[in-house]
Image (cartoon, grey):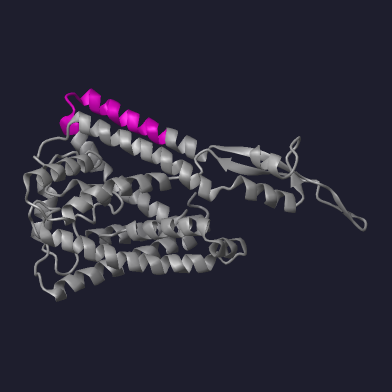
Amino acid sequence: MFKVPDLRNKILFTLYIVLLYRIGAAIPSPGVDPEAVQAITEGGEQNGIIGLLSLFSGGALEQLSVFALGVIPYITASIIMQLLTGVIPRLQKMQEEGEGHRITQWTRYATVVLAVLQAFGFTFLFRSGSLTGGINPITNDNAGTILLVVVTMTAGTALVMWLAELITQRGIGNGMSLLIFINIVSALPGQFGIARQTSSSIWIFVLLVIIVLLMVVGIIFVEQGQRRIPIRFAKRVRGRRVMGGNTTYIPLKVNNAGVIPVIFAVSVLAFPAILVTIVPSSSDFWVSIRNFINDFSAAGSTGISSTGGLVSTGMQTLYISILFLLVVFFTYFYTALQFDPTKQAEQVQRQGGYIQGIRPGRPTAEH
């Protein structure tokens, strides 16, 4: 593999960018107290919602590092632009006419705007201490320090977006997907450590590792699976030349929506935790609601309840059940936006293609 110069250079370049990304995720933002951050991460003081969102930043969010926001703003902006493309005719026309680069540019602008908003939001939430067990990692409460942290986190997001595009252009695979993968993988050692501590036997832990590996293999198998619908093209005679008559296929992926429904579902489940954190109230009723929602969020991330113990099995079951239902719903919703059988059938008909034994037009769309 390394004997091919082009492939070797791409792999080394990708590893170099990933190394830079992980270094940036460990560098604290200016105006952040490193000792307070260490106390938060080591003491498990972070709120469940922070642990949940930190999965997409490789733990950088709970440390308020330069790359604290990671790929979260870009993912959000991409989802918004994809949804708008599905419902706004002008954007659909631009994409069909090969002007996707303009939509990509607008996605970059939206990423920066969302990064500013999210940086302000998380900075004020960390400053209040409601997400960190009362610990304020911001050294000074003046406007200059807060603005410095926001600018640093926004610039970090722009840099992450640029690094991802460099991987896509000069490295291996899709840059943004690779960075998301790196973020999730970086959290696995900690998750395995928690599983090892809570397991009563080493064999239970080994069995858990085997199950996780089998799940990964199954996910890859389903992700690569596709149903190929054969398309035939009628022969056309132009002068002495016979054109067409070849056969191709439409690849319909088993999981056409990819990981987008999961991101949608996690975002929906994260919203109540952010809401109860923002709204200040000291009444017993509101505190009980806040603890319940925080425990619910922790069931999908840290596993540590608001009282410091482990989240109950019932809470974990509730979280997984609601997450499953949301993923199924968003999968149907997103797939309907991404793949329109009627438009696909019209495009095949315009190109002179047909499915063997199926009439063009509506029967093809129903098929």
Q: Look at 52% across and 38% down and name the residue there.
A: 254
Q: Main secondary structure of the magenta part?
A: helix
Whether residue 202 is visible: yes
Front position in the image: 183 or 5: 183
Q: Is residue 111 above or below residue 326?
A: below
Q: Look at 42% across and 38% down and name the residue there.
A: 328
- Residue 63 figure quarter: bottom left
Q: Position of residue 206 (x, y in %)?
A: 27, 27
Whether residue 65 is visible: no
Tell me the quadrant of the picture where the C terminus can be found. Answer: top right
**Could you tell whether 70 is left or right of 244 in the image?**
left
> Which residue is the extreme one toward the bottom?
144
Q: How many numbered circles are shown?
A: 0
Front position in the image: 357 or 200: 357
- Residue 326 figure quarter: top left
Specify start and end residues of the magenta stretch as a single range: 196-217
Is residue 206 rendered magenta in the image? yes
